[in-house]
Image (tube, rainbow, N blue to C red):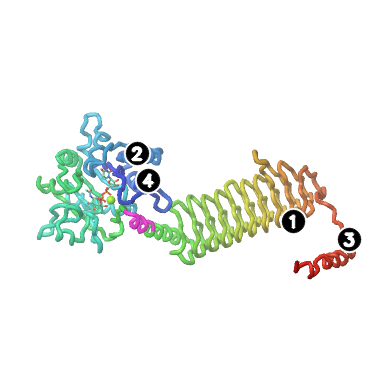
Amino acid sequence: MKKLAVIVLAAGQGTRMRSKLAKVLHPVCGRPMALYAADLAEALAGGRVAVVVGHQAEKVKDLLADRKVELVVQARQLGTGHAVTQAQSVFQGRAGNAWSGLRFVILSGDTPLLTEATVRGLLAAHERERATVSMLTAHLDRPAGYGRIVRGRDGAVWKIIEDKDASPSERRLTEVNAGMYVVEGEFLFPALAALKPANVQKEYYLTDIVEAAIRQGKKVTAYITSHPVEALGINTRAELAEAERVLRGRIRQRLMDAGATFLAPETSFVDAGVKIGRDSVIHPHVTLEGRTVIGEDCVVRSHSRLVESVLADGVTVLDGCVIEGSRLEGGCRVGPFAHLRPGTIVGRNARVGNFVELKKTELGEGAKANHLSYLGDARIGRRVNVGAGTITCNYDGVNKHQTVIGDDVFIGSDVSLVAPVKVGKGAMIAAGSVVTQDVAAEALALARARQVVKPGWVKGWREKAKKAHSPSKEKR
Ligand code: UD1
Ligand code: MG
């Protein structure tokens, strides 16, 4: 088989999105659309991939910076045919015409549902039929907006007609062009050079090479996919939402196939980069974002959102938690209603309870912060008990400071730890204390006003208060 090269078209603005952001940068399942085509291109022809960029080229270049792809700029977006022409220089080789010996796969940056298996199917058909041009087509119930495949009575392909250029009868055709092609290099670039922008949009249409090939007596193959959803091209926000829905379904399916349970799969949002271990259970309405990794035998209850976080085995996240950039070690339990901010580590078998916020804080193995706390910039030892309402005062208005608490410390309720401050191993802090000085190991720290009790005081006070509140006074 001939050597493959791939050209990805990603220069367009995507006017119909009505967005400030270039279309191919819009995320689908948490990943910019262009990455789906880039992944596919690399899988097919790593080393021989060109991506045509244009609109917001710098941002697209940044996105693809660590990829094995050549980027070419299409300064003005004069159409898909013009875009492919820009990539010719990438495949010149030493003699200047290396492209003529290559077989090109052309992908659009706006069709993220296309799978490698389908492209392989198209390549096999191309090979089998000894075709010069092959394209992927699909039968759609609502073909509006797509280029239509026009066939003769004998079923042979004649041409592709764009929606905007089509006659009413052509618009009734339901077989559409998916925007994905296999073309022999020796035909492709000369054919592109001969394109004319003789259409409603005054653009150089890549699709016109089909008619050109037939005129030259070359073989053209239309490969009808049995998965029409893969043809979905994203041109509008509604199509973006549809692609998101389909891809999210695929992600959940993959995770379920690998042994995760989703109690109500269609209600959970899981990004493409998420991993879930066997026998973990995801309750309804859970959001898992970025490269979150969940170990085995974990439970994530409803309305929790995990972002770029790592859960070891046997972790339980109860309802309503927000967990970002955090690491949760084996057997720990978090929530309900906890907020773990970036840089948090919850140790093995530790507990974080309701209305507790942690930021850049390490909570040691078996430690507990069960109720109503803010713990920021803190290192908390093993088996420490953090009493209800305890707060680290980590910010002095200018700088952030550390709180360090040794193993086996007992902190009573409603304690303020004014950082920087250290509490030694095994110490005890009395409830209601404001701790401003370091506490030695095994010491008891009390930092609150002593209680005063005045026996019978209330009775006398109440009588005086009643006299002062006489009704005659009120009338005046
Ligand atoms: C294109 C096809 C149409 C097909 C549909 C499938 C043409 C003329 N039409 O239409 O037959 O049914 O895809 O989704 O090819 N691009 C550039 N430079 C340009 C213009 C476009 O790089 O000058 C890129 C876009 O960024 C996009 C892709 O090419 O990724 C397709 O362009 P788009 O404008 O979306 O074409 P469609 O109207 O969808
Ligand atoms: Mg499109």
Q: CA distance from mark 4 to mark 3?
A: 70 Å
The residue labelled by disc 1 is 413
Look at label 4 and name its amino acid: Leu
Dot placed on the residue nearer the N-terminal end, 4 or 1: 4
Check residue 242 for magenta coloring: yes
Q: CA distance from mark 4 to mark 1?
A: 50 Å
Q: Position of residue 127 (x, y in %)?
A: 21, 49
Q: Quadrant of residue 412?
A: bottom right
Residue 265, how many percent across, how many down? 45, 64
Drawn side of residue 311 relative to residue 141, left or right? right
Q: Residues within 10 Å of mark 3 (few under 14, many from 20)?
A: few
- Say above or below: 81 vs 305: above
- For the residues labelled 2 and 4, the Cα–Cα distance comes to 11 Å
- Which amino acid does the dot numbered 2 rest on? Ala
- Report if the CB atoms under discs 3 and 2 are less than 8 Å apart: no
Where does label 3 land, which residue? Answer: 454
Nearer mark to the viewer, of 4 and 1 = 4
Q: Is residue 232 magenta?
A: no
Main secondary structure type of the part rendered in magenta = helix
Asked whether 140 or 66 is in front, the reply is 140
State which mark lies toward you, 3 or 2: 3
Mark 1, Cα crowd under 10 Å, few <14 / some 14-19 / many 20+, is: many
Magenta segment range? 236-244
Q: Which residue corresponds to the image point at 48% horizontal and 61% vertical from the top-left?
A: 260
Depth-wise, is mark 2 or mark 4 nearer the camera?
4
Q: Which residue is mark 4?
A: 21
The three-letter code of the residue at mark 1 reads Ser
Of pointers 3 and 2, the one earlier in the residue sequence: 2
| Amino acid identity at mark 3 | Lys
Disc sitting over residue 57 in the figure: 2
Residue found at the far front of this picture:
476
